[in-house]
């Protein structure tokens, strides 16, 4: 397994109290596999990713438990120096906002080239050639001319491609893309997503794709992990989830996708709000919003139940997963 996150816990200690952002996340990604991580705002998707990358805002953030096994070694036992070597070279992250992630006063060619001069000891000339090659690879037209341009001279979609090029530069084994297309318009979103999927295949990388958008996931992901209040509540091969969700929260998310074939149908949104992370409800954290909640849900935290699947490992953190599946 390329990456295995086991029972990860992350807290934020602030003046107002302790926010339990990640409460026992377990997920894994293999080489050549795409894992989509879904969930509402504040469910801990980005914080988990930051912990994996080693870029958690510490303090106030603190990892209070768990393991992050990458290529068989627990990154949480690494010194910062070793961690830095892994970052960029063996795992890389793509963020939503390319403009603020790129350096505005360096040409994109210089920024891409720097990856090779700093990490690979190439000459400036060779690094420039590599930069152009990368820009070609992410299909930026006229790369050889545009290599001298600055980030603001590119469109949003093209900038996102440059971000992808930066992430790919050292051919990492794992890429984490955190809402990589949210800031783009719909057609450009699809193009960038297709490009990511294609490069992932070509380079046999593992890809973790964090998104709100269940619509894009069906085409590109192999597995889905659904997060709620800092836990994975359902994890399954993508086909299983679309056929029949085994957790009421996943079911709610799926029913929130606007369907072109059902025009005029009222958009189902999960009622209520995500919990306050300083005061997560006892029992199942989803119980105040769950249409299926019963007494046991208010007292007993559901374990990760194993759910039958034809395609691979499937789990649900719902006492009534079987009923949900059959509903
Ligand atoms: N720097 C920080 N300081 C304090 N609390 C933080 C910080 N970053 C995250 N948190 C807490 O962790 C929670 C989870 O944040 P996270 O960014 O992982 O959510 P997310 O699932 O990525 O949401 P979104 O879809 O909006 O990006 C937040 O709601 C917040 O309570
Ligand atoms: S455990 Fe209970 S409250 Fe939680 S999702 Fe299942 S039915 Fe709903
Ligand atoms: Mg986020």
Image (tube, helix red, strand yellow):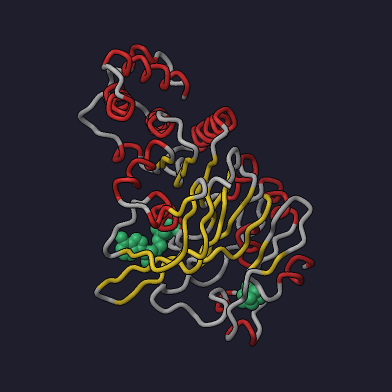
Camera sees residue 291? no
Does residue 68 appear to the left or right of 254 in the view shown?
left
Residue drawn at (46%, 64%) of the image: 66
Q: Tell me the quarter of the picture where residue 2 sits.
A: top right
Along the viewing direction, whichever of 239 and 62 lies nearer the viewer: 62
Q: Position of residue 253 (x, y in %)?
A: 60, 59
Does residue 294 appear to the left or right of 280 in the view shown?
right
Q: Quadrant of ligand 2?
A: bottom right
Q: Position of residue 93 (x, y in %)?
A: 41, 42
Q: Position of residue 30 (x, y in %)?
A: 59, 44
Relative to 17, does residue 8 appear above or below in the rendering?
above
Q: Position of residue 180 (x, y in %)?
A: 45, 41
Q: Tell me the quarter of the picture where residue 284 sits.
A: bottom right
Along the viewing direction, whichever of 187 and 232 lies nearer the viewer: 232
Q: Tell me the quarter of the picture where residue 159 sits.
A: top left
Along the viewing direction, whichever of 296 and 272 lies nearer the viewer: 296
Relative to 207, does residue 13 appear above or below in the rendering?
below
Relative to 139, does residue 247 appear above or below in the rendering?
below
Residue drawn at (47%, 21%) of the image: 137
């Amino acid at each position: 397994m390329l990456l295995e996150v086991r029972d990860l816990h992350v807290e934020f200690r602030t003046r107002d109290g302790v926010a339990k952002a990640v409460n026992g996340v377990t997920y894994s990604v293999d080489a050549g596999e795409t894992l989509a991580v879904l969930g509402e705002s504040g469910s801990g998707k980005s914080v988990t990713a930051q912990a994996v990358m080693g870029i958690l805002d510490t303090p106030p953030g603190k990892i209070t438990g768990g393991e992050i096994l990458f290529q068989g070694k627990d990154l949480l036992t690494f010194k910062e120096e070793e961690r830095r070597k892994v970052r960029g070279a063996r795992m890389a992250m793509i963020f939503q906002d390319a403009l603020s992630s790129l350096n505005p006063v360096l040409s994109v060619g210089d920024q891409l080239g720097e990856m090779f001069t700093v990490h690979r000891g190439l000459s400036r000339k060779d690094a420039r050639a590599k930069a152009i090659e990368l820009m070609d690879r992410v299909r930026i037209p006229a790369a050889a001319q545009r290599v001298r341009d600055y980030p603001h001279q590119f469109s949003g979609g093209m900038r996102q491609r440059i971000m992808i090029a930066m992430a790919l530069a050292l051919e990492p084994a794992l890429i984490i893309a955190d809402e990589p297309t949210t800031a783009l318009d719909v057609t450009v979103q699809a193009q960038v997503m297709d490009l990511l999927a294609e490069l992932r295949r070509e380079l046999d990388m593992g890809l973790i794709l964090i998104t709100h958008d269940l619509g894009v996931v069906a085409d590109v992901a192999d597995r889905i992990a659904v997060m709620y209040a800092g836990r994975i509540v359902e994890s399954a091969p993508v086909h299983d989830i679309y056929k029949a969700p085994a957790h009421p929260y996943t079911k709610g998310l799926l029913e929130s996708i606007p369907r072109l074939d059902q025009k005029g149908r009222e958009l189902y949104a999960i009622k209520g709000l995500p919990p306050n992370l300083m005061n997560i409800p006892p029992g199942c954290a989803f119980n105040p919003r769950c249409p299926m909640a019963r007494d046991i849900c208010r007292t007993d935290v559901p374990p990760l139940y194993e759910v039958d699947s034809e395609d691979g490992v499937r789990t649900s953190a719902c006492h009534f997963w079987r009923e949900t599946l059959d509903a």
